[in-house]
Amino acid sequence: MFAFAHNNFNVSNLDRSLKFYQEALGLEVLRRHEGSDYTQCWLGDHGASMHELELTWNWDEEDILDLGDEFHLAFRTDDMQAAHDLHEKMGCIVFENKKRGIYFIEDPDKYWIEIVPDRNNPNTVYWKP
């Protein structure tokens, strides 16, 4: 039996990334580790799930990161309209699929994050594009 532990994103500026994830998704820093030439931070969603996002900053890596194809995280929300309003204000929306009622935001290192409605919650507020 397996269960998710965490996903890792390598980031080019840890402070900028932490600010983004805290502001855009309300994540909190759970723990931090300082290595000899890197820093890692694990972020959580205030106990809504057990999943964590690990951000790794390699201090000597300033080049643009190769993100590959079709890689993204997805976050559920019970208020799509408020989420969309926040992300629109932040200017981080990069793609909207109005037919499916989902959209993607982009973090400072160009990682895409899918925002989806919590379809299991009867009180979910849906986005009205």
Image (cartoon, rainbow, N blue to C red):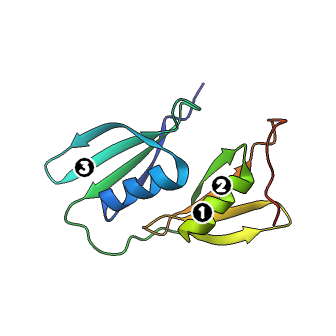
SS of the residue under disc 3: strand
- 87 relative to 97 in the view: left or right: left
Question: How far separated are the C-alphas under marks 3 and 1?
Answer: 27 Å
Q: Residues within 10 Å of mark 2 (few under 14, many from 20)?
A: many
Q: Residues within 10 Å of mark 3 (few under 14, many from 20)?
A: some
Specify the amino acid type for callout 1.
His
Of marks 3 and 1, the one in the foreground: 1
Of marks 3 and 2, the one in the foreground: 2
- 116 relative to 94 in the view: left or right: right
Residue named by callout 2: 83
Name the residue located 73 percent from the left edge and 52 percent from the top edge: 80
Tell me residue 102's x, y (percent): 75, 60
Q: Quadrant of the C terminus?
A: bottom right
SS of the residue under disc 2: helix
Specify the amino acid type for callout 3.
Thr
Residue named by callout 3: 39
Q: Are marks 3 and 1 in contact (CB under 8 Å)?
A: no
First in sequence: mark 3 vs mark 2: 3
Quadrant assignment, res 81? bottom right
Up-down relation of residue 35 to residue 24 (above or below) = above
Which dot marks residue 87?
A: 1
